[in-house]
Image: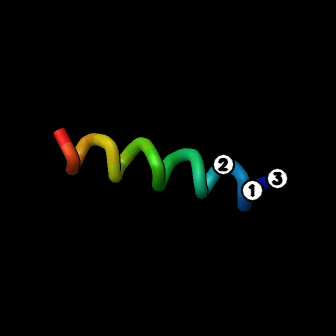
């Protein structure tokens, strides 16, 4: 489950960079 959380956080971070 830790892996899924890491992916979610990574996606959110990428979204911030895209903004």
The residue drawn where x is 34% and y is 52% is 14
The answer to whether marks 1 and 2 mark residues whose Cβ atoms lie closer than 8 Å is yes
Residue bearing mark 3: 1
Q: Residue furthest front?
A: 18
> Mark 3: which secondary structure?
loop
Q: How far is mark 1 from mark 3, CA to CA?
A: 4 Å
Say whether marks 1 and 3 touch (CB < 8 Å).
yes
Residue 2 on image: x %, y %: 75, 56
**Which residue is pictured at 35% across the width and 48% down the height?**
13
**In which image quadrant can residue 6 be found?**
bottom right
Location of residue 5 in the rendering, given as x and y in whole percent from the top left corner: 66, 48
**Within-10-Å neighbours for mark 1: few <14, some 14–19, many 20+:** few
Where is residue 3? Give x, y as percent.
72, 61
| Image quadrant in which the C terminus is located | top left
Q: Which mark is residue 2?
A: 1
Left or right of residue 8, residue 3 in this image? right
Q: Which mark is residue 5?
A: 2
Colour logic: rainbow
Q: Are marks 2 and 3 in contact (CB under 8 Å)?
A: yes
6 above or below 18?
A: below
- Does 7 appear above or below 18? below
Label 2, secondary structure: give it. Answer: helix
Tell me the distance, in whole angstroms, between the alpha carbons under discs 1 and 2: 5 Å
């Amino acid at each position: 489950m830790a892996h899924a959380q890491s992916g979610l956080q990574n996606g959110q971070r990428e979204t911030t960079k895209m903004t």
